[in-house]
Amino acid sequence: MRCSTSSIVLIPACLLAGLLVGCPLATDPEQPVALELDQTESLESLVSRTLERNLRGRSLSTETQGAWQIFHGLLAYGSDFVVQTRDGTQGALDYLLDGGMINGFEANPGDSYGDPPRRGMRVEMDPSTKVGQGHRDQWLAIVSQCGLPLETEVRVDERTFQLRDWLWQAEYDLPRNLELEFSWTLIPLTIYHDTDYRWIARDGMEYSVEDLVDSELRQSLPASVCGGTHRLIGLAMSLKKRRAEGRSVTGVWKQAEELINESIDLARRNQNPDGSFSVAYLHRPGWTRDLGETLGTTGHVLEFLAFAASDQTLSEPWVERSVRRLCQVLEQCEGTDLECGVLYHALHGLSEYRQRIAAAEKI
């Protein structure tokens, strides 16, 4: 079973499969019908089983799929994710770091920095292709969530870089982010630096993590990709790091906290009776018969909640209903090709949710 390269939002193939295997349909798309979900299986068991079945039951190949698909698999499963290559099945992360060829992963030597001098590593953009990097620093954000130290080596053709060279180049190239889309840049900055971190970019200006938080707060969430959930995840990760450092949550940090809390409440208020989240993400009520679209929006919103919500909120019935519904949709789409961004963001949401719940139970 392979991920397709169809639209990131609408997946008619999944809808067709749903009709064949008995996906529940509402009699009126404006009035969603609450489903009777199986409550006999524990939520922990259901999530683990769903993650395992999609890890083992779906396969990507470097001969067929590109970086867009493979990196999204890494996002969901990290070092556990494997790909089929000319030399057989390999761990996708190890394959990438060891210089394996992936269509759409275009890395080149960047600028010189440091003493003794090093070369940065720049990964080129290839938006709107669903093959190459669609958002600035998107691949770096995914790799940085795999738990790797900055000294990790990355082979590109005949050169060997370190992860620190990739991060430095992203910082230096910040003025090139004309899209003002810092969602993915914030993630590695938050993972590898403290929230008071500052640096000088190629325009000679000083920038900071706080500057990027401020810029993200100025952007429209409804007008942003995936309903602004990516922006919210970057903000949530930075705010969580800020609190862990024991630093003050004032100014833009307080504004970020307020926006995150408001967005969590919107997710709850606009949730559908069947447990899915609105197809308008956080911004208004909305429901559809299309399982692919349901998977995309519910998966992205749960992914945001898994990063941003408190332990108490994640254990509330409304969140648990969304988790069960998401697992149900994935089961109903089993055996069907799915767009990899939609599929693996949903699975990433489930994975992060499982980690949060497990960590809370140990406290």
Image: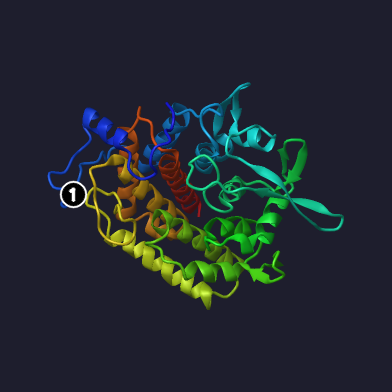
Residue 327: which quarter of the image? top left
Q: Secondary structure at mark 1?
A: loop
Q: Which residue is mark 1?
A: 32
Q: Where is 208 relative to 297, above or below?
A: below
The coloring applied to the image is rainbow
Which residue is drawn at the image coordinates 53% and 52% (left, top)? 135
> Which is more toward the observer, 331 or 338?
338
Q: How many marks?
A: 1
Question: What percent of the width, then of the height, locates residue 212?
Answer: 57, 67
Q: Is residue 270 left or right of residue 131?
A: left
What residue do we see at 47% from left, 60% from top? 231
Q: Is residue 302 left or right of residue 55?
A: left
State the image coordinates of residue 131 (x, y, percent, origin top left): 52, 39
User: Looking at the figure, which quarter contains the N terminus?
Assistant: top left
- Give above or below for 354 relative to 281: above
**In the image as oriented, which residue stretches furthest toward the bottom?**
251
**Front residue (pair 320, 282):** 282
Compare residues 183 and 272 and report the one nearer the observer.
183
Q: What is the three-letter code of the residue carrying label 1?
A: Pro
> Residue 288, position in %: x, y?
24, 47
Residue at figure coordinates x 54%, y 68% from the top left:
213
Q: Residue at x 72, y 38 (%)?
A: 155
Instruction: Please tell me how crowded label 1 is: few (under 14), some (14-19), or many (20+) other residues with Cα within 10 Å.
Output: some
Q: Does residue 129 lie above or below 191 as drawn?
A: above
In the drawing, does residue 64 fall left or right of residue 155? left
* Location of residue 328 by image quarter: top left
Along the line of sight, which residue is nearer the eye, 252 or 320?
A: 252
